[in-house]
Image (cartoon, grey):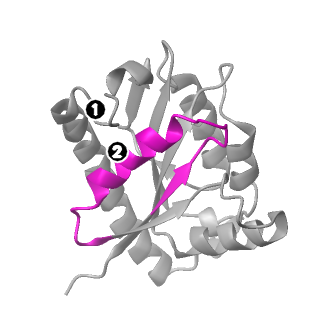
Amino acid sequence: MTEKLTIAVIYGSVREGRFCDTVANWVLSQLEPEADIVTVLIDPADRRVSAGAAQVAYKEMIERADAFIVVTPEYNHGYPAALKELIDSCYQPWHAKPLGFVSYGGISGGLRAVEQLRQVFAELHVVTVRDGISLAYAGSQFDENGTPRDAERLAVRFGLMLRQIRWWAAALKTARKDRDYRNVTG
């Protein structure tokens, strides 16, 4: 039996009425049929957890994860402050793990936010995969039920990103077991 891959899906927005839920629900629907994947949700808008407890909970979920998918909007040409706060809640648990992006926004589809996040995650020793999903004018790309209007095309793109995440996750998980990454970070 193959060991399951734990992927943390990270919500990037905490805004009231956020579109992040629609996009993240689609991501989760893509992961659901994957029998070898365990999904963990990290949502900074979860108000049931106090600030101090949330930081501990985030760290534990990040430690358990083998890989990440960040679902982020672009707000004012950048990524949301709540996402930065979550990212900065810990340091070492991020190391030597892969991450894919699903971004959304206006004309840029969130790509400016993703480029900034690639710099942040590089500092955390995270391997960001090349292929991700960018949803320009995201509201028009989903129907009133949250179903993508071009579901087949998005599923193909998601499959490509997931294959890259799986490859890196397997390679880095083996490497972390063979050699403690803290010994190579200087």
Calculate the distance from the C-alpha at mark 1 to the C-alpha at mark 2. Answer: 8 Å
- Residue type beneath disc 1: Pro
Note whether 112 is above or below 36 in the view shown.
above
Magenta residues (range): 8-37
Q: Nearer the viewer, residue 95 or 89?
A: 89
Quarter residue 53 falls in: bottom right
Which part of the image, by quadrant, shows the C terminus?
bottom right
Q: Position of residue 98 (x, y in %)?
A: 46, 56
x, y percent for residue 15 = 67, 37
Q: Which mark is residue 26?
A: 2
Q: Quadrant of the N terminus?
A: bottom left
Q: Residue at x 28, y 61 (%)?
A: 32
Instruction: Reply yes or no: does residue 33 show up in magenta.
Output: yes
Marks 1,2: beta carbons within 8 A: yes
Does the rendering let one see residue 101? no
Q: Quadrant of residue 172?
A: bottom left
What's under tag 2, amino acid-wise?
Trp
Farthest residue, direction left: 152
- The x, y position of residue 6, in whole percent, is 41, 70
Q: Is residue 132 left or right of residue 77?
A: left
Residue on which disc 1 sits? 148
**Horizontal side, residue 8 vs residue 146: left or right:** right
Query: In this view, which residue lies farthest toward the front?
Result: 144
State the residue at coordinates (75%, 39%): 81
User: From this viewpoint, is residue 27 visible?
Assistant: yes
Q: Residue furthest top?
A: 107
Vertical comparison of 179 with 71: above or below: below
Disc 2, SS = helix
